[in-house]
Amino acid sequence: MLIDPKSSTPIFRQIADQLRQAIDSNVYQPGEMLPSLRAMAIEIRVNPNTVQRAYEALEREGVVETRRGVGIFVAAAHRDHLNAAEQRLSSQFSAAIRQGVKANLTPDTVRSVFEDALRQILVEAMQ
Amino acid sequence: MITQSENPPVIELCGATKRYGRKLACDAVELNVRQGTTFGLLGPNGAGKSSLIRMLMGLTPPDAGEVKLFGENARVHNTAMRQRIGYVPEVHCIYRWMKVEEVLGFVSKLYPRWDDDLTDQMLSAFELPLKKKVAALSKGMTTKLSLILALAHNPDLLILDEPTSGLDPIIREDFLESVLQRHLCKGRTVLFSSHHFDDVERVADEVGIFVDGRFIARGSIDELRSNIKRVQIVLPDGKLPTHIPEQAVFQRLSRRDWTVTVSPFSEDLFEQLLSENHALGGNVVDLSLEDIFKDVIRGRKRQLEEIET
Amino acid sequence: MIGALIRKDLSLLRLYLRSLVAALIACFVAAAILIFWDVREAGQSFAESRFMIASILAGGTPLGLIVVTIFSALLSGSIITLERSDRSSQFLACLPPTRLQNYLSKLVVVASAVFLSLGICLLAWFIAYQLNHSGEMSLGSSELSKKFKETNHPPVFAAGSLRFADAWSNATLYNLFPLFAILASTTGGSLLASWGSRSNAVPTIFGLLTPIILYVAITIPIALLKLMSFEEAFKLFSFVTAGFGLCCIVASGCIYRVQREF
């Protein structure tokens, strides 16, 4: 797992996204246990509180679930598996949308900005 | 899970002041580090960070104010308090004539919580030669020995003063991993000063930028990064910025490109700057901790220069 | 904890302590050589071997006492400055032991070394006395002078040593007090002077000069001015020297406790 401390994406978000990718590409199967907070923190050399935030975010998004006293497990079949290209696109979209939300854009604005961009690129592609 | 704000404070500075001749190394410093927090002390060289750490270690008393550790006055540095602290200094002064095993033998008798198994684990992980004299060790190995001395007695507080300065990236990684594995992940407290911003961003919960004896920015890394951002404004031809906002920390003008680092940042401020200056365009940039640090320091330097002229 | 500190301080001074042992041995070896040469030159020989041993032991004792005095200054002049010179005092200051414990450990090491080596010299002297008087024949001073009167080259060293051995009967604590006083002042002076230097040469020399300066300052003026008899002046010197030495030891400890910048 590669963490870029300089990136504008907070570290816990980077961890969550990369873990999600790993889950989507079957590195961790549904029902399998993820590395403990401590083990993950030591391996990627990050504050354990940050790892905890990443796990909490993934749990909120329904990607993983905590079983008290046992560990953190990949949620069973949380959604269809995407292929590699779709995964990359998904995380890029997530990052861009997150920026927009932080800048207090409404979901409608985000959607219309997206659709404008999509239209523009399709136009360029046809030329 | 206990949130850290409920934990007892491990380090407390109340108006701590330290003067060296005419120079004010620490100017009525206020600091509160709670148990389980990792605090990154950032600041330019000669800013007084080392004085602050020396006061924490009881090497010098404050000229005014209080320095407290575990709720007790650090001035009366007693054995019991020191047995709860692990310290890795910037410059190592370990007895150079002792062999590594002699150093460990000596220091281990001074701490009741010394863990021989942990010592052995770290010795083999670091591959330290037991029979070599400290004078014959490289800087990296001496730092590793220093870390063993600091961690092997299971301290409640770990104080690191520029621990990885001058070390190669691999040793830095090993060092960080050790601190994480054998200390942080046990819910203990760390205060460390460093110029390696990557390490600070990875490991610190809170940071404080210490300049000229005072904290001029402090908070969690997320707070700092969301409060302090860089605004880029494209000015119309031949125009100068109408006025410098009071939130400006540092600014630079290059042809039409005006960049202002502001604190605190808000979308309203951005809109205001765009409209005030009839900007042709604008952008908000998220800053890394290092960028924040540099802009804050440069801004303050310029402030002082302007005051002098 | 004090045990670990003492072991560390012993280790710190290991070179000097080994030199002390070697020097003490050298004293008695030198005495032996001197006496053998002396006796042979005089064409004499010892009536019994115990007299030979006695004269060697008694001859070595004064040399040993000089060695002990020198090393009392050297050890106390080094035990603080060696840590100050490479800043390992800062390393020690960050460790759990209190400053008082650190200083006491140093005092214990220096005092033990001085007392032990002093004890060895006094023991040698005592044994010499006993050997001299343990048999039917004893060579007291009067018998000695009788025995050697006829010769042209009396064995001066051998005779003098045996006479010295006899002097043990007068070696009460009271009479030995000046010796203790001198040792206290060399130790104290060196310890105090340690704070003014980062090398161990300066405090050592200062420590050795302390009793000399005090002697010159007290005994000589008083004796010259005839304020007191020489014996009384010397007694005064002994008391002042002992007191001064102890004060220096305490003062040095206070500085150790209070030092702020390393």
Image (tube, rainbow, N blue to C red):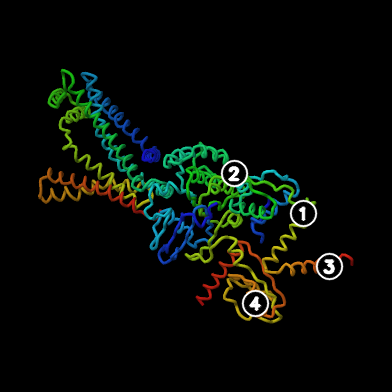
Tell me the chain of label 1: A
User: Which badge, 1 or 3, comes first in the chain's sequence?
Assistant: 1
Q: Name the residue under label 2.
A: A69
A26 sits left or right of C227 in the view: right
Q: Name the residue under label 1.
A: A87
Distance in Å between CA atoms under marks 2 and 4 = 52 Å
- Could you confirm whether marks 2 and 3 are on the same chain? yes
Q: Which of marks 2 and 3 is in front?
A: 2
- Element at label 4: helix
Q: Callout 4: 10 Å neighbours few (<14), some, many (20+)?
A: many
User: Which badge, 1 or 2, comes first in the chain's sequence?
Assistant: 2
Q: Callout 2: 10 Å neighbours few (<14), some, many (20+)?
A: few
- Element at label 3: helix
- Could you confirm whether marks 1 and 2 are on the same chain? yes
Q: Nearer the viewer, mark 4 or mark 1?
A: 1
Q: In which quarter of the image is the N terminus of chain C?
A: top left
Query: In the image, what residue type sits under mark 1?
Result: Gln
Tell me the chain of label 4: B
Give the percent coordinates (x, y) of residue B146.
50, 46
- Element at label 1: helix
Q: Mark 3 points at which residue?
A: A119
The quarter holding residue A10 reads bottom right
Q: Mark 4 points at which residue?
A: B273
Distance in Å between CA atoms under marks 2 and 3 = 50 Å
